[in-house]
Image (tube, rainbow, N blue to C red):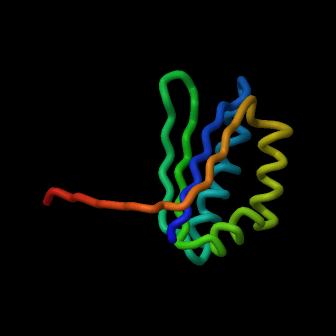
Amino acid sequence: MTIVTVFRSRLRDGVGPEYEPLAEEMSRLASSMEGFIDQKFYEAPDGERVTVVRFADEASHRTWAQHPEHRAAQRRGRDEFYSWYDISVGDETHSRTFAYE
């Protein structure tokens, strides 16, 4: 069953230049992991950032969540970058795709 993580956050003022390289590296790392399906990034006009990441199963999601580089980035996020964040992880119980071509 697909595992979906929704990561909502706000950066501290003036953080962008230091944050972006780390965020790009974490995105690259996640996408290289076995079981990775996809990820999308959004930013609302009020500054809230949202990342949606999907993995094929709980085991591959757990491997990503516990990856040493990811854990180090999480610590830096709390210590240096985020003023607030919220993480939700759940099972995707239904999915439907439509593509007009």
Of the pair 31 and 20, the residue shown nearer to us? 31
Residue at coordinates 54% horizontally, 61% vertically from top-left?
91
Question: Residue 42, percent across and down?
Answer: 49, 40
In the figure, 31 relative to 5: above or below? below
61 on left or right of 70: left
Residue situated furthest bottom in the rendering: 34
Residue situated furthest front in the rendering: 93
Of the pair 13 and 53, the residue shown nearer to us? 53
Residue at coordinates 57% horizontally, 26% vertically from top-left?
47
Number of marks in picture? 0
67 on left or right of 24: right
93 on left or right of 7: left
In the figure, 81 relative to 58: above or below? above
Q: Quadrant of residue 31?
A: bottom right
Question: Residue 97, percent across and down?
Answer: 28, 60
Quadrant (top left, top right, bottom left, bottom right) of the C terminus: bottom left
Q: Quadrant of residue 87?
A: top right
Residue at coordinates 55% horizontally, 47% vertically from top-left?
51
Question: Residue 63, percent across and down?
Answer: 71, 71
Residue at coordinates 62% horizontally, 54% vertically from top-left?
89
Of the pair 72 and 3, the residue shown nearer to us? 3
Question: Residue 71, percent across and down?
Answer: 80, 58
In the figure, 12 relative to 98: above or below? above
